[in-house]
Image: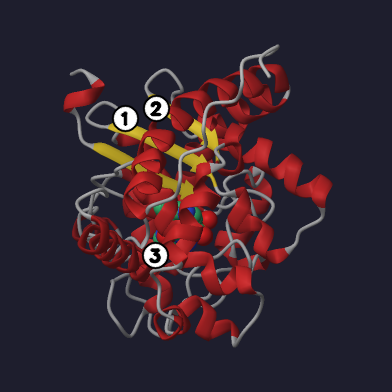
Amino acid sequence: MPAASRPRVLSGIRPTGSSFQLGNWVGAVRHWAAMQDEADCFYFVADLHALIDTPDPAQLRRRTREAVAELLALGLDPARSTVFVQSHVRQHAELAWALGCLTGFGEASRMTQFKEKGGGSVGLFTYPVLQAADILLYAADAVPIGEDQRQHLELTRDLAQRFNARYGDTLVVPAAYQGREGERIKDLQDPARKMSKSIGGAGTVWVLDDPKALTKKVRSAVTDTGREVVASPDKPGVTNLLTILSVATGRDVPALQDDFAGKGYGDLKAAVADALVALFAPVRERYDALVADPGHLDAVLAEGAERAREVAERTMAAVRERAGLLAPAPAHPTGAA
Ligand code: TYM
């Protein structure tokens, strides 16, 4: 199918933490990879969003390149998808400004991420507005994200509708988020909270963990009272492990429960560890080869940025024109007075 007749898909990931964690793969990146044939896909590393934590500059640069290598190792194919770095396309910051002018102060204050942190920088405050710009620049029809990003997508829809109402039909309103039950991966040490790059520690499985470290983390996962391997609200630890195993093996949870009838938590953990090692070992191998060739990564990113800029500039030109920003007059040709 030609790109023009396929739905447009866009999503992003921050280059924070020491690599992506299991939840990033389950909730987002595996869907990104699966959508490459049916959609016109744009995937990016959100380095402007990572800047909110003011990371060490050298580390941010290194992690940004590594994050690209991870995405490719996890199955993104630059021949089928546009893979780029957010800051390489200046229009993200530009559209964020225009959308910020349509965002209410109270509206931004109510966003969970800002509320949970109890304050912070103006960057943290306007984080969701930049995310809306990321999405709207590419006229995305669908945005594959984990459950925790749902509120940001709702704001994006509101801002697109508001812009269109104020200035005339310009921005594509992305489809409402379709929550997928059972794909929220929890911290192995505290199954009451989501697994996250910023928490790290023994409860976070990194995609690039070596088999020994990975197995150790799964073996020491917190489980629940009782001994039956069943998913239920009073067994959040076991439920999380079953979810992980289900995603890693492609077998559904009821079938897995049957497999484990008469077996215990130790057997479940062994199966989860084996499945994750089998899943991520080839990813690590591909990753090692990719980071060893920075020239190739740079070439992928140069091409991705060029394709992304073309689409982003088309939207931004329309936004400038609709909003009434005066187009610059063409410069004098050299030599002319
Ligand atoms: P980030 O980098 O925190 O996470 C990347 C993706 O992983 C999903 N995710 C999870 N899914 C299931 N279980 C978990 N434990 C889990 N942890 C993370 C997230 O929902 C996300 O889809 N703000 C975004 C990055 C971003 C973006 C965008 C995404 C910036 N601009 C535009 C989409 C469109 C973020 O911080 O994701």
Q: Quadrant of the C terminus?
A: top right
User: What distance separates the C-alpha of mark 1 from that of mark 2?
Assistant: 6 Å
Q: Is mark 1 within 8 Å of ligand 1?
A: no
Apparent side of residue 211 relative to residue 310 in the rendered image (left or right)? right
Kindly identify which residue carries mark 1.
Answer: 36
**Label 3 near label 1: C-beta < 8 Å?**
no
Kindly identify the residue that appears in the image at 27 percent across and 37 percent down: 8
Q: Amino acid at mark 3?
A: Gln
Q: Is mark 3 within 8 Å of ligand 1?
A: yes
User: What distance separates the C-alpha of mark 1 from that of mark 3?
Assistant: 21 Å
User: In the rendered view, how is the structure colored?
Assistant: secondary structure
Kindly identify which residue carries mark 3.
Answer: 149
Apparent side of residue 259 relative to residue 54 in the rendered image (left or right)? left
Residue 117: where, in percent of width, then height? 59, 82
Is residue 140 shown above or below 292? below
Kindly identify which residue carries mark 2.
Answer: 81
Q: Secondary structure at mark 2?
A: strand
**Label 2 near label 1: C-beta < 8 Å?**
yes
Q: Residue furthest front?
A: 337
Q: Can residue 257 be seen here?
A: no
N-terminal of the pair, mark 1 or mark 3, is 1
User: What distance separates the C-alpha of mark 3 from that of mark 2?
Assistant: 22 Å
